Amino acid sequence: MKLFLHALLLMLSASASAQIIPDRELERVPRMANDTMWCMGMHYPKGQLYFGFGYNKEWYTRSNIHVKDESGDYDFVLHGMTAKDRPKFNEVLRVALSIPQYGYRIGYWLPSSRFGIELNFDHAKYVIDEYQTVRLTGRIEDKVYDVDTLVSPVSFFAMEHTDGANFLMLNLMFRRPLVQKKYVHVYGVAKAGAGIVVPRTDVTLFGQRWNHNFHVAGQIGGIETGLRVEILRYFWIEPTVKGVFANFNKVLAIDDVLISHRFGAFMLLAHAGFQFPVGKVHRGKLPR
């Protein structure tokens, strides 16, 4: 009996000496947890929403360009056409910010997870090389061709997506921590996704030139990988490389002319932006 009373007195004493945490302190717990976990190199207990802007550089594969007049005047293919982007690296600092090939990123990292989703837009320029000699097959008016020909941009054919080949993609993302310091975190990131191409195309065909409206002209898929450097929790820099395959199956040209072509692209990209926590604290088990 004495032992029971002694234990009861100890419990009452501990309860009386415990401090009551004010409501305003409880409200700070999610924010404090998010800050502390970031400094410890752990995943965020909240989701992370981020925005970014950057630039890109492209190299393109050869492409077979199919030109077809719906009225039946011509239906031909230019085989193995080469193309480049614009402007060159040495011209970037001499033009307005909107002239080079830029990009936007909007993404969300899931709470306490290595996975996320991202909507990204790359304004890439695609310019057919002038005066190249390629194989021409098909029909122009009443004559059938299967011959090497010089592609003159003045009298025959020229095409450029210089208002943008415009790659719009939705990606699934994965990240893996590489370096975890108090104020700097470095992750390896990988992305894979698909989307649409929305070009505005400048076409010259048999001396006639037309710059059409923006329109959905096909599909695109690709993968991307690189590094993500997070600084002071709210800022990030992301240099990456990216490979895509684009199918432009309905490029609007002059009158009822449709152009289709496919190509691959290798891209160098660099983006930077800011991020912030959103949503409720996730109380699940953190991944290692």
Image (cartoon, rainbow, N blue to C red):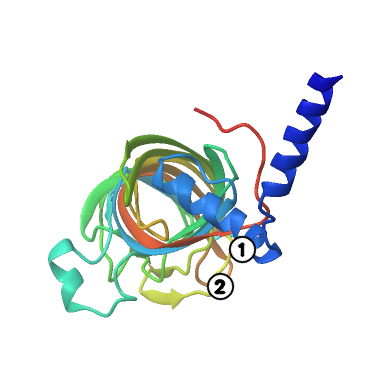
Q: Where in the figure is residue 70, as x and y percent of width and height? A: 61, 60
Q: Quadrant of residue 1?
A: top right
**Place of residue 32 in the rendered image (x, y in percent of width and height, measured from the top left):** 53, 55
Residue at the spot x=47%, y=53% of the render?
35
* Horizontal side, residue 107 vs residue 1: left or right: left
| Marks 1 & 2, CB-CB < 8 Å contact | yes
Question: Which of marks 2 and 1 precedes in the sequence?
Answer: 1
Q: Residue furthest bottom?
A: 96
**Which residue is located at x 30 percent, y 43 percent?**
181
User: Disc 1 designates what residue?
Assistant: 71
**Closer to us: 1 or 201:** 1
Image coordinates of residue 265 in percent, x first then y, are 35, 45
Dividing the picture into quadrants, the one containing residue 190 is: top left
Q: Is residue 261 visible?
A: no
Q: Residue furthest front?
A: 2
Q: Which quadrant of the structure image shows residue 263?
A: top left
Q: Is residue 90 above or below residue 136?
A: below
Q: Amino acid at mark 1?
A: Ser
Instruction: Please tell me the numbered disc located at residue 255.
Output: 2
Q: Amino acid at mark 2?
A: Asp
Q: Residues within 10 Å of mark 2 (few under 14, many from 20)?
A: few
Camera-side residue: 195 or 237?
237
Q: Disc 1 on helix, strand or loop?
A: loop
Residue 49 on image: x %, y %? 55, 58
